[in-house]
Image (cartoon, rainbow, N blue to C red):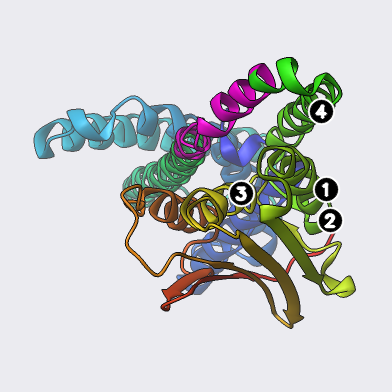
Amino acid sequence: MNPILSNLRNITLTYAIWLTIGCLLAALLVLTNISAWANALLFSIPAIMVFGSLSASAYYVARSLPMRKRSFFVVSGVFGGTALIYGIVWAVLCFAWNKLCLLFDEDWVGIALSQHLASLLLICGTLLYLLSILVYDVLLALDNIRQAERREAASEVLARDAELQVLRTQINPHFLFNSLNSISALTAIDAAAARNMTIELAQFFRQTLALSEKQKITLSEEITLCNHFLVIEKIRFGKKLQVHMEIDPTSDNCLLPPMLLQPLLENAIKHGIRDLIDGGTIIVSSKVRDPWLFIAIDNPVDTQPSQTQGTGTGLKNLQARLRTLYGDKSRVEWRITEQTFHIEIALPLERL
């Protein structure tokens, strides 16, 4: 649709511009002593307003030539030829309107329309229509840029969602396999424990499916999910696995991506607690330091290198996921000492 005719504001502004042009044309007629003010205004304003309506067709002329198909000669021929045709229409319109005014035989209507003035009106109409084409051409170019930006933004959103989906599917599946193996083993020696583990496993995956559909969840929801996971792991490892939560109450309603902590706890158990004869305690802590939310996990590690030492893929996936969501506004740091592995995540503070 013609952008100038798309709403009342644009229509009003357009006709205000054409009215101004009509007044300037009348002033030119007065200054060159061709006519008095009354005659000049009555001649120029109605004619220019009608021509302004006709110039709306310049939009379709500009749109008829896509940028990729343009050349200097094509543009000059189409734009220049159309402008000349409408210039002739404008000159004929002025001549007809002036003839109609002269029929009233009043001193305040009609002007002396000479051949020289008719030629000037022809040139003026051609230039005005050509200017209209150029204005519409600029508007079309700006609209194409906006559409391209919207398409690019939509593509970025789709690419981000696809990347997030890939990263989510890379969560370590060994937890499920190990849990099922543990349930299978427990059915023969402790049916009650196997039943409890099955219930917790169902609760964990039910909540995982529900939360994974959201882009952000609260820290309290993430902790609840992790607790279901830890209950299952405690059935597997018994007293060997201890967990201590140091969650700042002010961080409970802070937002973070779902399934952010569970893979880290899984790694802490797989590469830390499992390799220790006496096990150990995993410490999960959070604190708010406006404008940041800090979450840290500490777990003991074996002083001797393990044959199942990780490759760091999970941590790289975590960094990639946060970079996709937050850009450069997030941070993941970790360090390992002789007996402890420490990882800290810093996220922009967002609250529910």
Residue 33: tell me if it is visible.
Answer: no
Image vertical order of residue 49 relative to residue 100, above or below: below
Residue 306, image quadrant: bottom left
User: Nearest the camera: 19 or 255?
Assistant: 255
The mark that comes first in sequence, 2 or 3, is 3
Crowdedness of circle 1 by 10 Å Cα count: few (<14), some, many (20+)? few
Of the two numbered discs 1 and 3 in the rendering, the one whose residue sits closer to the viewer: 1
Identity, as a three-letter code, of the amino acid under mark 4: Ala
Residue occupied by mark 3: 43
Dominant secondary structure of the magenta stretch? helix
Residue 1, image quadrant: top right
Identity, as a three-letter code, of the amino acid under mark 3: Phe
Residue at 51% from the left image edge and 63% from the top image edge: 29
Query: Distance of mark 2 from mark 3, alpha carbons?
Result: 77 Å
Query: Distance of mark 2 from mark 4, alpha carbons?
Result: 27 Å
Of the two numbered discs 4 and 3 in the rendering, the one whose residue sits closer to the viewer: 4
Crowdedness of circle 3 by 10 Å Cα count: few (<14), some, many (20+)? many
Residues at marks 1 and 2 touching, judged by CB atoms closer than 8 Å: yes
Of the two numbered discs 1 and 4 in the rendering, the one whose residue sits closer to the viewer: 4
Query: Distance of mark 1 from mark 4, alpha carbons?
Result: 21 Å
Residue at the bottom extreme?
A: 289
Residue occupied by mark 2: 220
Q: Position of residue 180 (x, y in %)?
A: 62, 21
Res 224 label: 1
